Image (tube, coloured by chain):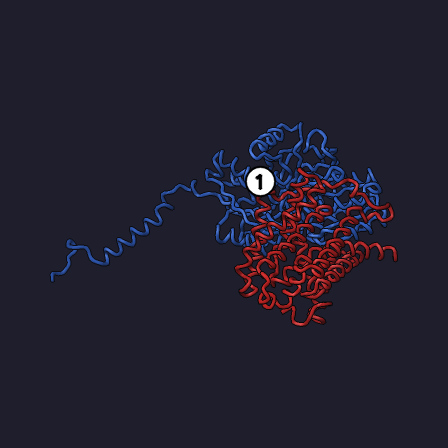
Chain colours: A blue, B red
Amino acid sequence: MTKISASGPIARRTLLRAGVAAGALQITSPFILTARGETPVKIGMVNPLTGVLSALAQSELDGAKYAEAEINKKGGILGRPVQLLVEDSANDVGTGVQKTRKLIDRDQVDVILGDVNSGIAAAMGQVTNEKKVFHIVPGGHTDTITGVDCKWNVFRVCNNTTMDTGAITPELVKRFGKKWFFISPDYAYGHSLQEGFIKALKKLGGTYDGDYLPINNQDFSATLIKAKGYKPDVLLNNMGGLTQINCMKQIVQFGMQKDMALGGALFEFETVKALQPDAQAGWWVMEWWWDQPKVPEVVKFVADYRAATKKTPSARDWFGYVSMHTVRVAAEKAKSVEGPKLALAMEDLELPPDVGLGPLKVVYRKGDHELMPAIFVGQAHPPKAGPEDVYTIEAAIPGVEAAGPVEETGCKMVHPA
Amino acid sequence: MLTLILYNVTNGLMLGAFYVLMALGLSLILNLSNVINFAHGNFLALGAYMALELTKVIGFWGAFLVAPLLTALVGAAVELLMRFVYRRDPVYSLLLTFGLAFVMQGLMLWWWGPTPQEMHMVPALEAPVSSELFFITWYRVFMVGIVIAAVIGIFAFLRYTRVGLRIRAGTLDLDTVSALGVNVRMLRTFNFTVGCLLAGLSGVLATGAIGINPNMGDDLLMPSFIAIIIGGVGSLTGTLFGGLLIGVTAALTAAVYPAASEVVIFVMLVLVLLIRPRGLMGEEGMLS
C-alpha cells in the first residue's frame, strides 16, 4: 500500500474536520448571514388572564397587542420586529414568578411587562432585578413598587396609590364630609390604598373605620351591616375587579347609597360597564379616560382603536399600549434593548403626545420611575350620550402634584455599576 | 351588640343556605358514584350564563326554570365520560373532573369573555324587606325559599320514590343493587344529572348577588366540599347542617375579623378531621 502524500487522496481526519466545519456552517450561517433586524425584540407579558382580575388583565393585553401591531407596521424597534409573548399568572404569586423566569430563561425576552396584581408585580420585580431585565409594571398600584422597594430596572405606568388617594380625597371631603368607612382587599394593593387614604384624610381632620376582606370575597353583608351602624359620610369601595362589582351590587341592593355617598380610588371602565345603572354611581379616579374631546390625539386614538378592536379603550388598554410604546421610545433613545441602557434612557423620559394621550405632559419621573400623567377625578353615572358614557371628568390633577416629592416615597434608587 | 349578633347569624344562615344547595349536588354525586366532581363550580357558572342568555328571550322567570334543566342536560352528557373511570382507581375520576373544570372554564372564557356580566333581576326582588332589616332583600328571601323547597324536594324524592330508594341503597352497596337487576348505569346518569341540576340552580340564584363570570363557581366549590366533610361524607342531612354551620361561622367571623372569614372554614375542617374525621353525621370509614 502506498503512503498517502500531501497531494494524494484526502486523509480521513481531514475529511472529518471538513465535514464538521461544513456542518457548523450550516447551523451557524443563518445567524451570521441574517441581519440583526430579523431577530425580534421579545417582550414578555405576565398577567392574571384567569381569576378575579382577568377582565382588567385582558384589557392590558388588548392594548399591548394593538401597540405591537402599530409598532411593527412602522418598522419595529431599532429595525427589529416586536414579538409579544404572553403568560397567565392566574392571580397567583408563585405562578407569576415561575412564568417570569420561564420568559426570561427559556424565551430570552428583552423586556418584561406585568402584573395587574400588585403582589405579583412586586415579586416579579425581584426576579427581573436579579436577571437585569427591563421591567414595566403597567397596572399594579401598590406604592412599594416605586417606593421603598424601587429598583433601577422597574418602571410603572399606572398611578401609585398615593397619587390616586391624593387626587380624590380633597374632592370627597369637600363634597360629602370627613367621616369615612373603607372596604378594602386584604393584600398589598388594598393595604397601600387604605393607608394612602387614611394619610390624606387625617391631614384634613377626618375620622374612619373599615374592614379588610379577602381578595376573592363574595359576600359583603357583614361589613355592610357594620358600615350602616357607623353612619359614615362616605363609603369607600376599594375592592378590585370582580369583587368590586359584587360589592357595589350589594351596596345598592341594601340601599346604602341613600344614606351615604359612595366613592373610592379606582372604579375601572370594565367594572362600571358590568354594573346595572343604579350601581353606576359615586366619585372616583380614572387614570385615563377615552372621552377627551379637547385632546385631538385621544380622539384619533379612540377612533382607530375602535376600528381595529371593536371596543372602546379603557385605562387598562392604555396601560398596555403605553408600556409597549415606552419600550420603543426608550430603545430609540438608548439605541439598545439592554436593561441598564433602557433604564437610563427612561428616566425623565417624556412620552410623545400620541402615546401619552392626555391633556398634560406625561413623564417618567427619574427619582422613582413612576409615570406622571394627569389624574382624572369625576363621577360615575348611568349612560348618558351613549352606552359607554358612564363617567364625567370634573378635574384633571397633575400626577406630580398628587404624588408628592420623591423623598416622601421612600425610594432610594441604586443603579448597577 | 345582641342586634349585631342576630343580624350576622341571620345573614350567615342565608349564606349557609346557598352553600347547602351547592354541597347537596356535590354530595349526591360523591355518595353514589364515588366521584369528586371538581367541575361542580363550573356547572354553577354554566347555569348562570345560560340564565343570562335565556333571560333575553323568555324573561327572568322562564330562565329560572329552564337554565338548571339545560345545565342538567349538559351534566348528563358529561356523565357519559365518567363511565370510563367508574371501575378504576378514584384518582382517575378526580383527574377527569379536574381537567373538565379547566376545559369548561376555558370554553366559557372563550365564548363569553372575561368581562363580568350582569343579569337583570325583577326589580321588586332587589329591594330590602324593610329599612331595619336592610341586608335582607326580597331576593335573598326568595333564594332561601327556593333552597328550602329544593332540600325538601330532594329529601322527599330520596325517601318516597323508587328511584330515590335505589340511589340510597346504591350509596350503601351498589354491587348488590346491581345484582338485584337495577340498571346501575342509568341510576348513575340520573344521579349525576340531578347533582348538576342543583349546581345550575345555584348558578341562577348566584346571579342575584354576584356578577356572572367564568370563575364565579371556583370560590364556592371549596366551601361546598368542606360542608360535606364537616357534615359527614355519605350523609345528606350532615351536608345540610355542615353548609349552615360554615355559613354562620363565616358570617360571624366576618363581623369580628373580616380578613379571617375565609380561613375560618378551613380551621373548622382541620378541627373536624382531627377530632371527628367521619364528620358530624357521617358513618365510620366513609371518608376512605
Q: Nearer the viewer, residue A26 or A239?
A: A239
Give the x, y percent position of residue B226: 69, 62
Tag 1 residue: A62
Please tell me whether mark 1 sits on a helix, a strand or a loop.
helix
Specify the quadrant that holds the N terminus of chain A: bottom left
- In the image, taking residue B145 as reference, residue A102 lies left or right, namely left
Give the x, y percent position of residue A56: 63, 44
**Residue A330 against residue A208 in the figure, above or below:** above
Q: Can you name the residue that lies furthest to the left here?
A: A1
- In the image, taking residue B145 as reference, residue B50 lies left or right, namely left
- Residue B191, quarter of picture: bottom right
Is any atom of residue A200 visible in this view? no
- In the image, taking residue B164 as reference, residue B6 lies left or right, namely right
Give the x, y percent position of residue A210: 79, 51
- Residue located 71% across and 71% down the image: B276
Q: Which of B66 and B56 is in front in this view?
A: B66
Q: Can you name the residue that lies furthest to the front here?
A: B181
- The amino acid beneath tag 1 is Asp
- Residue B186, quarter of picture: bottom right
